[in-house]
Amino acid sequence: MADIAATSIAAAPARSRTGFLKGWLLLTLVLVAIMVTIGGATRLTGSGLSITEWRPITGAIPPLSEAAWLVEFEKYRQIPQYQLLNKGMSLAEFQFIYWWEWGHRQLGRLIGLVYLAGFLYVAARRLASPAFTLVLFGMGLLLALQGLVGWIMVASGLEPGMTAVAPVKLTLHLTFACLFFASLVAALAHLGTFGGRIPAATGLRAAAWALVALVFVQIGLGGLVAGSKAGFTYNTWPLMDGLLVPPAQVLWSVTPLWENLVDNHALVQFNHRVGAYLLLAAAVGLAVFAARRAPEAAASARHLALAVGAQGLLGIVTLLLVVPLWAGLAHQAFALAVLGLAVSLAWRLSAR
């Protein structure tokens, strides 16, 4: 009995350390999920270029007087989006889009502060091993880089002739956010948050990580759809203008050819559709593979396949309804859920 009591007392600090790590990383994970969703709202409301400067510190304070609002509005009136798209916008209309972008940036600042404060506490109290602390430090660098990529994206929309950010840079911004989100899921899985390790053959583990890569590709293709506004065209399914596959002269109508991949609405949307079909097939295949080779992972793999299917249905609804705000945000948020399920399953699979 004395030995059991001593073991319990010794384990208590370890549980406390792990508890803080899990709580801190889970909080950051939730904030990032909200951040990505609000980013989608910022894009769909056309708000992303309303703040024309990048001021990481002083930018946290919004305009506090009518004179200050007029100063910010005048800055916006100098950029191409106002001159080519929103000319004649009222101050009230400008304030609407300004608050969306301001809120997006404030949430980014909050995530940075939460992560920095938590990391400093972990490092000072030595709550994690040196190797895991180094990993957490690298994740912090990724988060900081994401903020820089966000400004590079916004700056692309301030160039002459631009009325929105460049689709490639928006996709890059989204991809970096998803990379950080995936790293949080992996860190939590490492701490046992989503269950213990599952012995699995090398082939199953490789298939699980390949599915994670495919999810990233599909999210990137979705970013191109969002950035080019390709979701507002070809709003039928399963056909596109009456065809399962649009003709080559439609898919490759832009010169140079590579620009079709980011600017041609038909090809961008077609690629995203094909990506969805491939992802669903891969998820179902993984579920079948897991049921045969690693029964302990079967339920998780099946849930992942169901999530991919639900995400596909949500994408179809979003397309048919011509991207209403609620559907666009739900589709973007659920993509993170699919990514999280895929990463947690792949991480839990271990060698036999």
Image: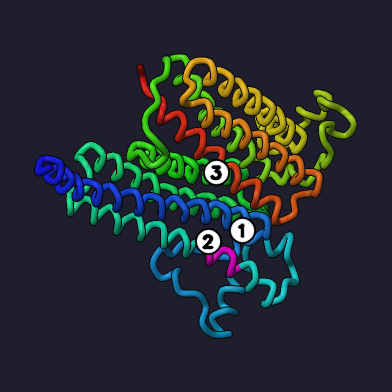
- Which of pointers 1 and 3 indicates the residue nearer the eye? 3
Q: Residue 221: x percent and y percent? A: 63, 35
From the image, tell me which residue sits under label 2.
Answer: 104
Label 1: few (<14), some (14–19) or many (≥20) C-alpha neighbours in 10 Å: many
From the image, tell me which residue sits under label 1.
Answer: 42
The question of residue 105 being in magenta is answered with no
Where 299 sits versus 165, above or below? above
Asked if residue 69 can be seen in this view, the reply is yes
Residue 341 is labelled as none
| Quadrant in which the C terminus is drawn | top left
Q: Nearer the viewer, residue 172 or 287?
A: 287
How far apart are the alpha carbons under marks 2 and 3? 17 Å
How far apart are the alpha carbons under marks 2 and 1? 7 Å
Label 3: few (<14), some (14–19) or many (≥20) C-alpha neighbours in 10 Å: many
Q: Is residue 136 left or right of residue 215?
A: left
- Contact, mark 1 vs mark 3 (Cβ under 8 Å): no
Segment tinted magenta in the rendering: 98-103
How far apart are the alpha carbons under marks 1 and 3? 17 Å
From the image, tell me which residue sits under label 3.
Answer: 336
Where 30 sits versus 142, above or below? below
- Contact, mark 2 vs mark 3 (Cβ under 8 Å): no
Looking at the picture, which amino acid does disc 2 mark? His
Which secondary structure lies at badge 1? helix
Please tell me which of labels 2 and 3 falls first in the chain.
2
Which secondary structure lies at badge 2? helix
- Contact, mark 2 vs mark 1 (Cβ under 8 Å): yes
